[in-house]
Image: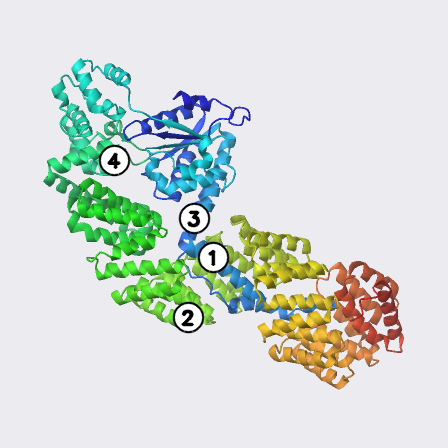
Amino acid sequence: MTLFTENLAKDPFSEEAPADFLFHVRGVGGVGKSTLLRQWQEAARRADAITAVVDENDVHGVQQALVELVRQLEAQGGPCKEFGKAVEQFRREQAAQAEPLPVDGEASVSSRVLTQAALGATSLIPGAGFVTAMANPDAAAQGLDRLRSQSRSRSQRRGGRGDETGLSRAFVAELERLCRRQRWVVLFFDTWEQTAHYLDGWLLRLLDEEFGPVPANVVIVLAGRDELAERDWAPLRAHVVDVPLEVFTEAETRALLTSRGVTEPAVVEAVLQLSMGLPLLVELLSLARPNTVEDLDAGGDFADVAVERFVQWITDPKKREAVRACALPPQLNEDVFHAAAGPEAEGLWEWLCGQPFVSGRGDYKHYHAVVRASMVHQQRTHSPQGWVSAHIRLADVQAAWRGSVEERLPEAKRWEEDEWRRHRADETYHRLCAYPGTYLTAALEQLVHGAGQSVAVLRQWIETFEQAARDTTDPTLLSWAGRLQSALTSDDPVLACLGVLLSHGGLSADGRSWASTYRGNHLYLCDREEEALAELDRAIALNARNATAWSHRGEVHYWLGHFDQAVADLTTALELEPSHARTLTLRGETHYHADRYEQAIADFSNALELEPSHAWALSSRGDTHYHAGHHEQAIADLTAAIELDPTLAWARRRLSDIHREGDHYDRAIAEFTAALEYDPAYAWALAGRGEAHQRAGRYDQAVADLTAAIELEPTYAWALASRGHTHYQADRYEQAIADLTAAIELEPTYAWALGARGEVHRTIGNYGQAASDLTAALERNPTFAWALGARGRTHHQAGRYEQAIADLTAAIELEPTYAWALATRVQVHRQAGRHEEARRDLERAAEAHPDDVLCMFERFIFEAMEGRLQASAEQWGQLFSAVAGPTDADTDFLNLLRALFIETANGIPEATEKLLATRDGREVLADLLTYLVELSALTDELGVRAQQCRDLIMERHPDVGRP
């Protein structure tokens, strides 16, 4: 005791004499570990500490332990809001494991449409419309789909340790908050020999500060029977304060007996021999107040004798029977107490809780394991019929309580409810104790369903089974408990346990079907789709009315892109269970990916009629509306889904896409930022925000976000390519080529990145390398219209007009609405001297794209070359006014055009210098020079002005006009 209190008196932040932060109390059962922990907890609170303690009754996994620890910390230190949010997020992620995921591979139609609008965006700035169109709908979309499926696959399909990381980080953040206000926070972990199975690895990661820095004034106390495993704890061995507890010495035993009034020498000698110095047994024997040696008949097991003598010492028969009756339930609350002890024990609950062998916190108490084992053994052997009837009565009570919970829960939700599971597990325990052989198969079928929930639930069920096996000593139960515990420690406990359960020949066809269903779903979550299909085939063959098996098989087909098979399976599942919202939503997702938007929306709507707060169905319907062109409905659904679930990051991502496409970049960035507040490591949102900054011309911010995304996902080729494109737009060509090359090395078939690198080479005059990259892009994607246009442009600038026209024509054939390609072909025809072909293209453009500013620009240039500049002066003015939201650099360019074409009094030198001050990149100047060279051939005043402007540019940048 002194060791611990002196440690609490130290300065936790002292560098010279730091306080110890890790204690390990160890010793045999009954030696007093739990008692010492209670004393330490009281001492800690007297030292201005807040404390929390968990033991085997609270822990079947990390999440349950953390929730219980925080519950106790909140009671002393106030609400832990951040942890509460993390728990909600954890539960959403667990629920989201049931959601289907985007299909990997080729770009989904949704992602193609996401970037499609960029093809129509044009500008008067030479090359600007072309650069905007570089957001290629196929290549960029594949990047989006790929990341979406990868990131959600990790967090939802595979699950596991990563799911608890967010909870653990939030837990550490709450510890840091509490430690700012309290001198100490002390965490106690009792019965470590059992809880270490679930918490040992997590605690080591916590102490390694994997979840964030642990404050110096956090103390951790472990209590268990065994020494800490040297292999795992060796790095921390120097920091562990080892507190081994020994049995009482003879002097200590005599002192305790004297304090209890037990002084007869013969009796004291008998207690010394019988108790073996175990503090718990010494305490029980002393409380029995033995007067003679005969009162301590040493026949039988010493623990049994000690416990029996203590019970006999209780003179009130009602109390004595209550103590015995309440040993049968593994855990007690006041309701269980009354069910076990009966009406005769009215008013005795508080008395029982005060007995030295009863401990526990919160709603549930439990007997010390040594005491309970002794009482259970005595009742089973001394009164077999009473044993059976008592357990049947308790099982029926638990069944009735379970039934009450079922009245407010749909069948599909029962296994998700902690209260229902507790009643079901306790009922199963009592029926196994009453009739081990008769109830074995039913208990194993319950275990099948436990395995289908999570490892934590499976562990809870196996522990229930083990408890029944120990308490009954039934050989068959003990054999099954050993096999299940061995399977639980395997690399994949769910598959291993289900395999063990399937070996039971007595399992019903329905039970075997469920076991195969859960195995199939688990294999799917482990990315073993073909094995999953085979297992689900077996499940359906065993029970063709197993709707869950049909639904899971449909989901696997969906994931593999077998949309027709998926719809067939999901439809069968819905025929069996028409009101299953999840299956309706899954079929809607399948229709959506098969481009059947109306059917998808119908399924999502039907799911929402069943569950109006189904955020997944709502967000998916919004996504489908968006891709069907119903933008208002899309915004409404996505916004409503986010209100239901603010952590729905991908829905924010889609909403921000809509804002970005509407040139509402700040709104898009706000949505991305909100998504990142819930998940700062969401690489997709970082990349999307970076892209929005890029579109808004904020290149440094774009690079910062894209770099952060790449640091999180170093193999994120799409973000690398996007950052390369951003560098290109910021005229940082070497960095652009480096990023695009890195993206191509990661994904050699990445056509868009090849095309983008070709565009960089074209911009800096490397026409040969540009054509090579663009050709490689087209080999990988022959329908890549943008790459055809880019190669045509490269040929044009290299003076290869025939090849330029061929590529531009091919691009237009692939994308008849590709206004930029048509306008550029007008320019090539004109500069090649093919005025009639140019005129025909202009007529086509006027009909197909009457409001496209670049097509209008080419028409006015054509008229100027034919000497009709004055006739089109008014249209030139209207054209300049049509450019929306120009930047300062755009304004300088427009002012130069005005000086050339309509406001001739303005000085060409001044306008040119202003342009060169804001836009001196090769991209803009090279395009501008192609027009100036053409206009300089005119003999009128326009030709003179064009020549003057050309000379000024060439004087400053002599290499920009050279191939």
To which quarter of the image does residue 302 belong?
top left
* Amino acid at circle 1: Arg
Whether 62 is drawn above or below 367: the answer is below
Q: Which residue is mark 3?
A: 161
Instruction: Give the mark nearer the N terminus: 1 vs 2.
Output: 1
The percent position of residue 360, horizontal first and vertical second, equals 31, 33
Q: Which residue is mark 4?
A: 334
How far apart marks 1 and 2 lie (CA) works out to 20 Å
Discs 1, 3 touching: Cβ within 8 Å: no
Q: CA distance from mark 1 to mark 4?
A: 44 Å
Graded by Cα atoms within 10 Å as few (under 14), some (14 to 19) or many (20 or more), the crowding at tag 3 reads: few
> What residue is shown with label 2?
562
Residue 158 position within the rendered picture, expressed as x and y whole percent measured from the top left = 42, 55
Residue 956 horizontal side relative to residue 19, left or right: right
Left or right position of 496 against 431:
right
Q: On residue 152, which mark appears?
A: 1
Q: Which amino acid, mark 2?
A: His
